[in-house]
Amino acid sequence: MTQETIARPAPLAPVVIAPRRRWWRDPWRKPRILATITWAYLIWSLVPLAIAIAISFNGSRSNSVLHGFSLQWWWSDPEESLWHDPELHAALFQSLRLAVLTVLIAVPLGVAFAIGIDRWHKRPATAATFLMLLSFVMPEIILGISLFLVFQHLLTFVELGTTAQILGLVTYQVSYPVIIVRARLLTIGREYEEAASDLGAPPRQAIRRVLLPLLYPAIFASAALVFADTIDDFVTVKYLSGAATSEPLSVKIYNFTRAEPTPAVNAAATFLLVTTTLAIVIGYLAYRHVTKGQRTGGVSEFANV
């Protein structure tokens, strides 16, 4: 046996790592924990909605036990269904009226305000942008109480009801189109308007023929958000409601649940959920139509317009 053979160290035994520890230390492992938490959150959020929707098609008056499928709480029942109950029927159209009118007023004002802020510079633009962002972080109950006090003690010629509700909703819903359109303006830049001006277009024509078509994606996105946020609004319209006929569906649902509600209340809640979802879907389809040929991001881009 030579000296080299004696000096050679013995080979080290391989380190055996348990399968669980090896999976935990692998940086490229599948995110099973995050996926489990995500699915658990989705199930926790959607199961109550599924139960409420199922009860709206219940074949009896029970709100806890299902007795077959029926449409009596939607329109079959001649007295207590969503379509035939006088209070729920009037509240349904009041919700749609407030949502549509708020969109027709708030979106054009927001677009004009966003273009105006884009033309301002320094402190006025900063102050206006801060004012728009403030409505997002301020609790809605403060806005509702403040608007109620304004109409009660300052603008006394405006009676509580539909007019006061529309004014209150437009006051803070205008922030959506301002922020969204303003972000779109920052990505577009002034080059297109300047090119139109160089070709002889006056400022108004440059805005109408060049700038507004480029803003259509942001306008449709803001209109969908305003409609979806208005149709199920509760706090503001609750404080500014006048007579019972001016109470929208969200307030009626709250009032009915304090007594002994029938599944018609679940039908009303399902109607709000479906209407809100349809508003987002229609806004997304309109976005796809006006951006045909220039889309790159799909749903994610629509969410970031």
Image: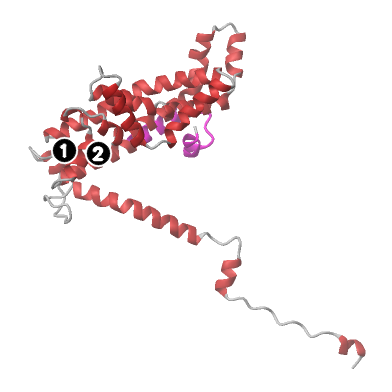
* Residue at the spot 57% in from the left edge and 67% down from the top edge: 24
* Residue at the spot 44% in from the left edge and 25% down from the top edge: 219
Q: Position of residue 7 (x, y in %)?
A: 87, 87
* Residue at the spot 30% in from the left edge and 36% down from the top edge: 235
Of all residues, the one furthest to the right in this rendering is 3
Colouring scheme, one of rainbow, by chain, secondary structure, one colour: secondary structure
Q: Position of residue 149 (x, y in %)?
A: 30, 27
Quadrant of the rendering where the N terminus is positioned: bottom right
Q: Magenta segment: does it hold 186?
A: no
Q: Nearer the viewer, residue 247 or 127?
A: 127
Determine crowd level at label 2: few under 14, some 14-19, many 20+ residues with C-alpha closer than 10 A: some
- The residue that label 2 is drawn on is 271
- The residue that label 1 is drawn on is 82
Residue 300 seen from this side: yes
Q: Does residue 246 lie above or below 68 as drawn?
A: above
Helix, strand or loop at mark 1: loop
Q: Main secondary structure of the magenta part?
A: helix
Amino acid type of the residue that numbered disc 2 sits on in the rendered structure: Phe
Residue 291 seen from this side: no
Q: Position of residue 4 (x, y in %)?
A: 90, 86
Would residue 164 be found to the left or right of residue 289 on screen?
left
Amino acid type of the residue that numbered disc 1 sits on in the rendered structure: Leu
Q: Position of residue 60 (x, y in %)?
A: 11, 51
Q: Magenta segment: does it hold 280?
A: yes
Of all residues, the one furthest to the bottom in this rendering is 1
For the residues bearing labels 1 and 2, Cβ distance under 8 angstroms: yes
Give the total of numbered labels.
Answer: 2
- Read off the magenta span: 278-304
